[in-house]
Image (cartoon, helix red, strand yellow):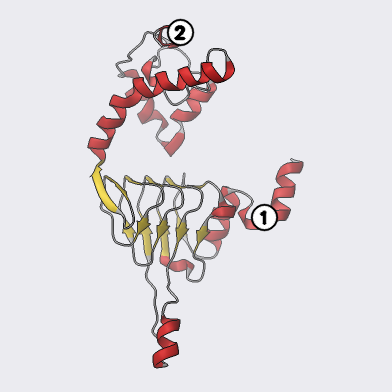
Amino acid sequence: MLKEYIKKIVYGDKASSEAYIKYLRNIGMKIGDESTIYVPTKTQIDTTRPWLIDIGKNVKITEGVTILTHGFDWSVLKGVYGDILGSWGGVKIGDNVFIGMQTTVLKGVHIGNNVIIGANSLVNKDIPDNCVAAGNPCKVIMGLEEYHEKRKAAQVDEAKELVKLYRERYGKEPDEHALHEFFWLFTNGEDELPECWDSMMRLGGNYEYSKGKLRKNQKKFSNMKEFLKNV
């Protein structure tokens, strides 16, 4: 409690994701449920025109992300030509979007639903629904379905590497928490899930849907113990 109190005193509205989102909503931004701003103190969301920003549900904004609704490049033009030329544009981010670290979203950009934006991207044009996009400038790399299949195919190899490195570092077997993103490899939800696994199921607000999918999951190993024996 004391730590949270000190953070609130030091960082104010940026003390937590909840506090920051509450502040942004209060000044006029539209932000949907289940959305998270992971490191508010290192995130810059343009508050000069808050009514221009519309962020959907289940949007994950990671450290170092910048979202802009205006430009001040016209100051150079004013210095030469004397006139003032406004520079602004609304930003709309759809539902179920992940924005990677150190990404910049420029004014006037619309990002669709079910989109993954890679780290260090410069989003300077619209991104359609159901895709993975990255780069400077940001471009669509592949469709979401293709990426889904790619990630499923990589699960066993990535989980095995995680276990090997854990053993090398700590000299013991990893626990449920260390493997909390890979538990679908060795369970289909027949038994009660550990709390750290269950909390993963609750991400995104679609818990019952995810539980239903888990019941139909074709697990690769009978249980976590068998998986560890195969590493």
Query: At which x and y percent is residue 124?
Result: 33, 62
Viewer-nearest residue: 92 or 88: 88
Query: At which x and y percent is residue 158?
Result: 38, 24
Count of marks placed on residues: 2
Secondary structure state at the residue bearing disc 1? helix
Q: Residue furthest front?
A: 168
Q: Which mark is residue 11?
A: 1
Residue 56 visible in the snapshot: yes
Question: Image quarter for residue 3?
Answer: top right
Above or below 29: residue 76 = below
Q: Residues within 10 Å of mark 2 (few under 14, many from 20)?
A: few
Above or below 203: residue 38 = below
Above or below 60: residue 79 = below
Task: Name the residue at 45% across, 88% down.
Answer: 79
Q: Which mark is residue 225?
A: 2
Which quarter shows the N terminus? top right
Query: At which x and y percent is residue 41?
Result: 59, 54
Task: Name the residue at 39% across, 84% down.
Answer: 85
* Inter-mark Cα distance, 1 to 2: 44 Å
Question: Image quarter for residue 11?
Answer: bottom right
Residue 84 visible in the snapshot: no
Left/right placement of residue 197 relative to residue 40 reads: left
Secondary structure state at the residue bearing disc 2? helix
Task: Name the residue at 29% across, 61% down.
Answer: 125
Q: Residue furthest bottom?
A: 82
Left/right placement of residue 216 relative to residue 20 reads: left
**Three-letter code for the amino acid on which mark 2 is drawn:** Lys
Viewer-nearest residue: 152 or 198: 152
**Three-letter code for the amino acid on which mark 1 is drawn:** Tyr
